[in-house]
Image (cartoon, coloured by chain):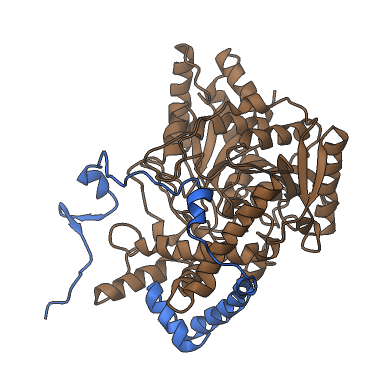
Chain colours: A blue, B brown
Amino acid sequence: MDNKTFEHLCVLSKLSFDDESAETTRRQLDGIIALMDKVKAIDLTYDDTLDKNEVPFASLRADKAEEPFSPERLLSNTQPKNDCYVIPKMMNVE
Amino acid sequence: MELTKLSIKSMREKLVSREITSAELLASFSERKDEYFAYVTQTSDLAVESAQVADLRIAAGENAPLLGIPGAVKDNICTDGIKTTCASKMLADFIPPYDADVVQRLKQSGYVLTGKTNMDEFAMGSSSQTSVFGGVKNPYDVTRVPGGSSGGSAAVVAARLAPFALGSDTGGSIRQPASFCGVTGIKPTYGRVSRYGLVAFASSLDQIGVFTKTAADSAEVLNVISGYDKRDATSANVPTPDFTSYLNRDVRGLRIALPDEYFGDTVGDDVRTAVLNAAKYFEESGATLVPCSMKVFDYAVSAYYLLACAEAASNLSRFDGVKYGLRGEGATYEQRIVDSRNKGFGAEVKRRILLGNYALSSGYYDAYYRKAQALRQEIIKEYNDVFTKADIILTPTAPEPAFKIGSSENDPIKMFLADICTVMANIAYLPGINTTCGYTDDGLPIGMSLIGKRFDEGGIIGAADFFERNFRRKDIP
């Protein structure tokens, strides 16, 4: 994997590495991708119509919210400060 | 009377007859020290309170399935008001505001929570050494790993710190540690047990299951945690049988498939011999052995890691340090997210996120992810073919017994290949159970896996129970 691809993956993954750990991680990924390349050798095509019969959970129930939690419970893991909740700064105001 | 060695059924009978109290039962497990880093959090005070409440309920004539029975829960399963860390710095202080469905069901059945068990970070690993709190040790040999990712749950049961523990299995994370620690571990059919409240790793592969000393005990716990849950969109709306009704049967007429590929050079001699001896025992007891072949075996690990990493990359994108989890620093929103994830995730988790995004990214999607999906269909087809000729499939659970701490965990490829015997059942949504079938000369347990048809947990529990009733297990030294 070249540096450009690795850097692109870091952007997609919202991760960053210093030079040393980037090199180690890139080398490890190369080894794993070589293992994954094995799938290219097999001549198969994915048939998305097949999953409707083979996967017993292909038809899911409607995604409706029910019994919502109270705001207090939902915010129980945020960081309270003087009766307020501290959220990260989202924008830089010029 | 050594209470920690009783079956769950015997514990319940003695509790109901008031021969023992839940408080006494809990004390017998609590007196044993956790020398294995099996727990991340021990809920000792809560456990004492719960045991006292259970004793009052029993005195009032109640008889729920696990009333007064201690049990542990893997630390990626949400427990209301009790830390659920996934053994990660990212969630080190996370306290869920709700219980997972399985925890609600255990509470309704009266269990006594002993603690949350240690694991590989976000359930990614096969050694339980990637926990941010420190690695778990194998109770059979503390210089060796307990397997993973549910190594803490396996160690808790093996060391008799609790009679049962819940785990999760995405590619073998219940069956492989059960094998390494010499206990019984069952991964039910995908959909049998609700995943509501399980911190997601790979949603189409994850399944909650049970560690116990025996298959008979696993039937007791599986009875409690199984069932439809509308909050999990993939929960299967199928009847739950009484799994204990499959116990104490024989195996006459049972057709057991032995796929050639599982018994080749991939597995060590000790393991191959022990599993084939078990097959021979089944045959001598009236079962029929069915030789077969599963040609996709060689591709299964590659397909599994493509699917699992792709789903993990998506699932773990929610950890941005905003709503919950570790919060990093930075001048901009983007920098804060990156800093949160850099500081919160360990090396293995980061590697899998990168791999998942690689497999899903433009230019690679068809070559990797779609191909892995095609392989998944082929694996399902091969299982369907085998199940036209056989009732269950018998394989080794892991290629080798428990390995030394420090010997392999830093080699990602070697660790991936350690899952070669277990990943296919997850890919095909099938139930699998590990039970011990032998020991090495050094006394390390060797496990075998019985894989069943979808929703036939009863069949594999019955076969494992038959074997266990006729096999002498060795306790930890």
Residue B372 % position (x, y): 56, 65
Q: Quadrant of residue B210?
A: top right
Q: Quadrant of the N terminus of chain B?
A: top right
Q: Is residue B367 left or right of residue B378?
A: left
Please name whichever residue, A37 or B128, is drawn nearer the observer in this view of the structure: A37
Residue B378 % position (x, y): 61, 59
Residue B195 % position (x, y): 45, 45
Q: Is residue B408 left or right of residue B329?
A: right
Q: Quadrant of residue A69?
A: top left
Residue B229 % position (x, y): 41, 37
When the figure is inspected, residue B316 is found, relative to residue B67, above or below; the finding is below
When the figure is inspected, residue B12 is found, relative to residue B279, above or below; the finding is above
User: Which residue of the protein is positioned furthest toward the left in this rendering?
Assistant: A94
Q: Is residue B260 left or right of residue B376?
A: right
Q: Is residue A68 left or right of residue B385?
A: left
Please name whichever residue, A36 or B477, is drawn nearer the observer in this view of the structure: A36
Kindly tell me whether residue B147 is visible in this rendering: no
Q: How many marks?
A: 0
Please name whichever residue, B130 or B422, is drawn nearer the observer in this view of the structure: B422
Identify the residue at image location x=56%, y=48%.
B429
Identify the residue at image location x=43%, y=52%.
B199
Q: Quadrant of the C terminus of chain B?
A: top right
Kindly tell me whether residue B234 is visible in this rendering: yes
Identify the residue at image location x=55%, y=77%.
A29
Q: Quadrant of residue B166?
A: top right
When the figure is inspected, residue A73 is found, relative to residue B87, above or below; the finding is above
User: Which residue of the protein is positioned furthest toward the front in this rendering?
Assistant: A49
